[in-house]
Image (cartoon, helix red, strand yellow):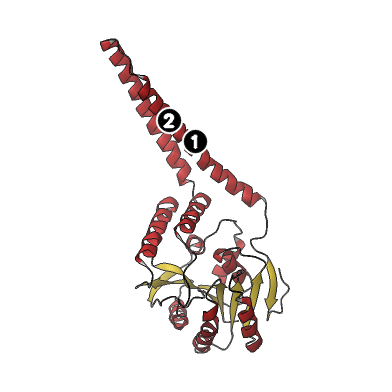
Amino acid sequence: MDISVVIPVYGCRAALPELHRRLTESLSAITDNYEIILVNDACPQNSWEDIEKICEKDSKVKGIELSRNFGQIYAITAGLDNSKGEWVVVMDCDLQDRPEEIINLYNKAQEGYDVVFARRAQRKDSALKIFVSKLFYSVCSFATDTKFDPAICNFSIISRKVVDSYCSMREVHRAYVAYIKWLGFKQTAIDVEHNDRAEGKSSYNFKKRMRMAMEIITSQSDKVLKFIVGLGFIVAMLSLLGAIAIIIKYFISNILSGWTSTIVALCFFGGLAIMSIGIVGIYVGNIFMQSKERPLYIIRTIKNDNQEVK
């Protein structure tokens, strides 16, 4: 197989026929030996019905139905695990990622790159979403010591060795772009045209993005723990200086400060202690979730596949 295209499907059911048509035209211009993998992540619009129809009409389309909603990253992982192409494209189903750009990604990869990301030079998103995205990647960049470009998304093409390396990592908390960057293969990015969403709106709201940022930070870096240690040291030094100042004041004026400052100090240190314990608890929770060794996803059905379901 020359090229596989992995697409998690959640929402945008109406876009699937047009997505299939444009993908077929774009991929046929590169090779006839390709596959399109549509992973239904328990889409609330029941997109699996359309995926089945597309699979019946086109044997090059592989449909994967997950047993429940596991999330976009896990749907991508399911698609990558079941892909066969020497090159694999990852893209969204809402047609914001233009299928016509695949040939540009592929041609750039032929220059000797293992990973080519699509950079959305002019994003067709709201100002709020763009701001949240920049904030999200700024936090991730600081915590993981890896530079993230907010204009880069999951839309990319990666070689088979990158796919195999990515799939070998079975962490519960995972991220596509962050993991691909961590692998360290030869990477680049090209500017692509970004279209308006074909239907509906993104399910990645502010709350979900912040939760994902916390998962990436606490699963990929111990920088937060080191920050807490440093903060504790600074607070301890300030407290020591404050104690010395109080002792000096007592001997000078023989007057001690009132209970208000004591209560404020107790509340501050109590809050700091609770926060520190909570952060350590998050890391312990990550260890607990990973120690279960549950599968990252469960497949209910695969269409147009001659392999056994893993």
Mark 1 sits on what residue? 274
Q: Secondary structure at mark 2?
A: helix
Cβ–Cβ below 8 Å for labels 1 and 2? no
Front residue of this view, candidates 189 and 119? 119
- Say whether residue 268 is left or right of residue 46: left
Residue picked out by circle 2: 267
Q: Is residue 167 depicted above or below 5 in this figure? A: above
Instruction: Give the residue displayed 66% in from the left and 86% down from the top.
Output: 56
The label on residue 192 is none
On-image quarter of the N terminus: bottom right
Q: Nearer the viewer, residue 217 or 85?
A: 217
Mark 2: give few (<14), some (14-19) or many (20+) Cα within 10 Å: few
Q: Position of residue 224 (x, y in %)?
A: 46, 45
Name the front one of labels 1 and 2.
2
Q: Is residue 287 above or below residue 85?
A: above
Disc nearer the start of the sequence (1/2): 2
Residue located at (55% from left, 45% from top) = 283
Check disc 1 and give the amino acid type: Ile
Q: Position of residue 32 (x, y in %)?
A: 57, 89
